[in-house]
Image (cartoon, rainbow, N blue to C red):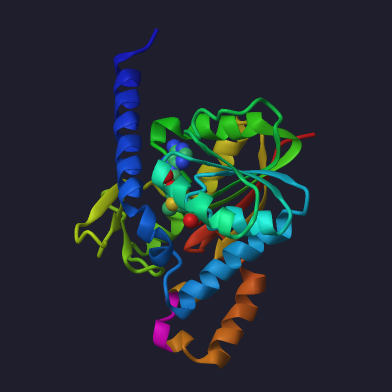
Amino acid sequence: MTTLYERSDAADAAIGKQTVQNVYQQLAAEYDERIPGVGHADDMFTDSEMRFLMAKVHSGTKVLDMGCGTGRFTIPLALAGARMTGLDLTAAMLDQARTKAKAAEVDIDFRQGDMASLPFPDNSFDVVTSMLALMHIPLSDRQSVFSEIARVLKPGGRMLLCVKNGVFERMFSGDRFAEVDVTDVENKELIFTQTQAGEELRAPWFSFTPDELSLLFARAGMSVTHLKGNSPISVWLAEQVLADKGIRSVVQTLEATLSDVPPFNHLGYHLLVEAAKPL
Ligand SMILES: C[S@@+](CC[C@H](N)C(=O)[O-])C[C@H]1O[C@@H](n2cnc3c(N)ncnc32)[C@H](O)[C@@H]1O
C-alpha cells in the first residue's frame, strides 16, 4: 500500500522533473555556450572529464549516456568508436544533440525518457555514463536510478559518472566553473543566470558525497572501483593565477596524480566515478 509520505514524495519528484524539463527546454539553444565555461580553469576541468571517459570507453563498446543533453560527451564518444545511445528528459536538448550528431556524421540512437525508469531491457549495455545530470534527480528517485543502471548493465559492465561533490560544498558553497551557472547550495538549486531571455532559471540540484555514492551503488549490487576528484587544486586558484602557463602546467601535473588518491580524490569540485556490476 502506498503511504501518504510516499505519495507526497512522488508528487514532489514529478514537480521537480517538470521544472528541470521546462528549464532545459528554454536553455537548449544556448546550453553549449554556457556549460563548458570560458576560463583556463574551465578548460582544465572539461579536459579532465573528457580524459576520464575516453580512457575507460573503447571502440565498439555499447554505451548508454543518461541525461545526454546536447551530446557534449555522447558525440565525442561516438567519434571514438563507441556504439552510443543517448537518453534525455528534454526534447529540445535532444534536438540539439541530433543536429550536432548529423553534422559530425555519427549514428547515435537518441531517446527521450526518464533515467528513473529506463526504456531498455536488462543486460543491454557494456557501459552507462552520466555527466552532470544525476544532481537533477529528486532524492526520492535516487535509488531507483542506481538500480536501473545496474539492471541495464551487462554482467561485468561499468557505470561512469560525474557529479557535484557534496564534501566540497561543505568547505565552500561558491562556484568556480562556468560562472553563469551558479549553485545555490542552501536551497539545493542550480541557477542559470544571464540567460538570453533575460530571466534567471532555477532547477533542483542535489550534490553527492563519496559515501552516498558508495551506498547507492552497494544497494544496487555494484561497487565503486575508481573515485577521482576533478580539479582539487585548481578549484582554489584564481583565474589570474592560472593564466600563467608555467603554473598551469605544474597544477596539471600535480592534479594528474593527486586527484586519484585520498584525501584529494574526496575533495574535488566534482567527482568522477567508475563502478562495476559483478560478472
Ligand atoms: C546539466 S545537463 C548535462 C548534459 C550533458 N550530460 C552534459 O554534460 O553537457 C543535465 C541534463 O540532464 C537531463 N535530465 C535531468 N533529469 C533527467 C532524468 N530524470 N532523466 C533523463 N534526463 C534527465 C536534462 O534534461 C539535461 O539535458
Name the spot of residue 234 as percent of width and height, x first: 49, 76
Name the spot of residue 10 as percent of width and height, x first: 35, 24
Q: Is residue 213 above or below residue 39?
A: above
Q: Quadrant of residue 77?
A: bottom right
Name the spot of residue 243 as percent of width and height, x first: 46, 88
Q: Is residue 93 visible?
A: yes
Q: Nearer the viewer, residue 95 or 225?
A: 95
- Decide whether residue 238 is among the magenta residues: yes
Direction top: furthest residue: 1
Residue in the image at 34% along x and 69% along y: 179
- Left or right: residue 112 versus residue 259 is left
> Where does the magenta region start and end?
236-240
Residue in the image at 77% along x and 53% along y: 59
- Left or right: residue 231 versus residue 153 is left
- Left or right: residue 225 versus residue 180 is right
Residue in the image at 65% along x and 48% along y: 107
Q: Is residue 262 visible?
A: no
